[in-house]
Amino acid sequence: EAQVTQNPRYLITVTGKKLTVTCSQNMNHEYMSWYRQDPGLGLRQIYYSMNVEVTDKGDVPEGYKVSRKEKRNFPLILESPSPNQTSLYFCASSLTRGPYEQYFGPGTRLTVT
Amino acid sequence: QKEVEQDPGPLSVPEGAIVSLNCTYSNSAFQYFMWYRQYSRKGPELLMYTYSSGNKEDGRFTAQVDKSSKYISLFIRDSQPSDSATYLCAMISNDMRFGAGTRLTVKP
């Protein structure tokens, strides 16, 4: 089954404790991205990657890191999480070289206390 | 002012009704317009994708783009309880922007 998977689905952590949210797609997609979704603000892009070893900032990159060492994986790293990073996070991928026709993962709900 | 404005609702209609969901935008550079459907506790899924002004139909769904008015719409005919979800509009120029989403409930 073609899909984007994320882990963990739910995470509660404390301020400053480094964490990684994994994202993997099995569709051989070029483009991958991370979004956060907050009430009233919609989806905002954090980082994106157009290919292996190519990443770029989205609209809200502060406090986040990403890497794209393999085509199928695109982990999101929070080096020192803060409460304002409490949000619902989505990974997405697309066969195209841009954010067109994206497939989204199921989401990771992160709470930072 | 947000680049993309979308009424958050909630919108509640009886089964079988025609639903109209709308977004307005301010950036005339947007060229690609999309509608995503997001069920509770799920990721968004792409419903419709259009490039130009005009209408595009897919089953019970019709997407409409009016670039002159900077206004896009999604119409759902013969709405079903399974259509109950949050609908997100999205647009692309050099950047991608999403609306905040409209929560729709279709009551049996």
Image (cartoon, coloured by chain):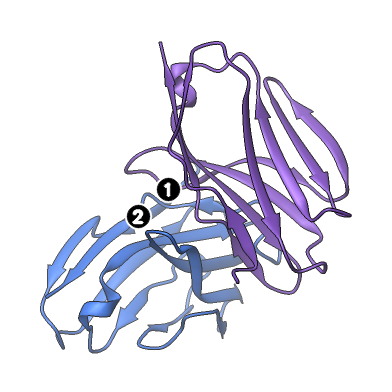
B84 lies left or right of A111:
right
Q: Residue at x 52, y 68 (%)?
A: A33
State the SS at label 1: loop
Marks 1/2 in contact by CB < 8 Å: the verdict is yes
Q: CA distance from mark 1 to mark 2?
A: 6 Å
Task: Tell which chain the image draws in purple.
Answer: B
Q: Is residue B82 above or below residue B15?
A: below
Q: Amino acid at mark 2?
A: Gly
Looking at the rendered structure, whether the residues under marks 1 and 2 are on a common chain is answered as no
Q: Amino acid at mark 1?
A: Gly
* Label 1 chain ID: B
Q: Which mark is residue A107?
A: 2
Quarter in which the C terminus of chain A is drawn: bottom left
Task: Tell which chain the image draws in blue.
Answer: A
At which x and y percent is residue B39?
A: 41, 37
At which x and y percent is residue B72?
A: 73, 46
Q: For mark 1, what is the residue?
A: B43
